[in-house]
Image (cartoon, rainbow, N blue to C red):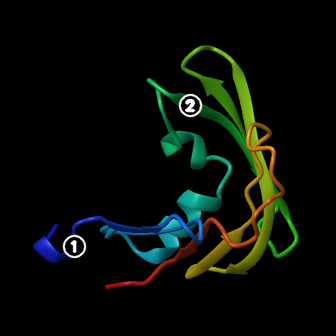
Amino acid sequence: MAGNDRPRAIADVTAGTILATVTIAVPPERVFRAITAADQIPLWWGADNMYRTTKHTADVRPGGAWRSEGKGADGRDFHVQGEYVEVEPPHRLVMTWKAPWDGVPADPAAPGFRLHPD
């Protein structure tokens, strides 16, 4: 990574927003698949000392549902789910996020991904 390609993050806690930027040395099509495909997400989402995603299902289209299931480091099962709001392969993906432990309605503004080739 070049010096200006370091991961960066900006947080606005008042607005509840985090903007993170990372450079990944693969085409946007590959990244889009990694963040949407049921066979790809369990390969990277999680860390054994915290949690591990074991199953992911997704209907990747606006209005389609997604759900990830896994196990925490303590052995307890968990899941998160949501709905796709915007789907523009391979450059944009916006979805809601609902985790049972949050106790708040799904947020349609996050997370979102914008993928740009260098």
Q: Which mark is residue 71?
A: none
**In the rendering, at what x and y percent does residue 105 appear?**
84, 57
* Residue under pointer 1: 5
Q: From mark 2 to mark 1, how far is it between C-alphas?
A: 28 Å
Residue, x 67% and y 30% (percent of image)?
A: 70
> Where is mark 2, residue-wise?
52
Is any part of residue 58 visible from this angle?
no
Residue 36 in sight from this viewpoint = yes
Q: Quadrant of the C terminus?
A: bottom left
Crowdedness near tag 1: few (<14), some (14–19) or many (≥20) residues, C-alpha within 10 Å: few
The amino acid type, in three-letter code, at marker 1 is Asp
Q: Secondary structure at mark 2?
A: strand
Q: Position of residue 43 (x, y in %)?
A: 51, 41
> Residue lying furthest right in this view?
63
Q: Quadrant of the N terminus?
A: bottom left
Q: Is residue 24 above or below residue 40?
A: below
The picture quadrant where one finds residue 15 is: bottom right
Mark 2 nearby-residue class (10 Å; few <14, some 14–19, many ≥20): many
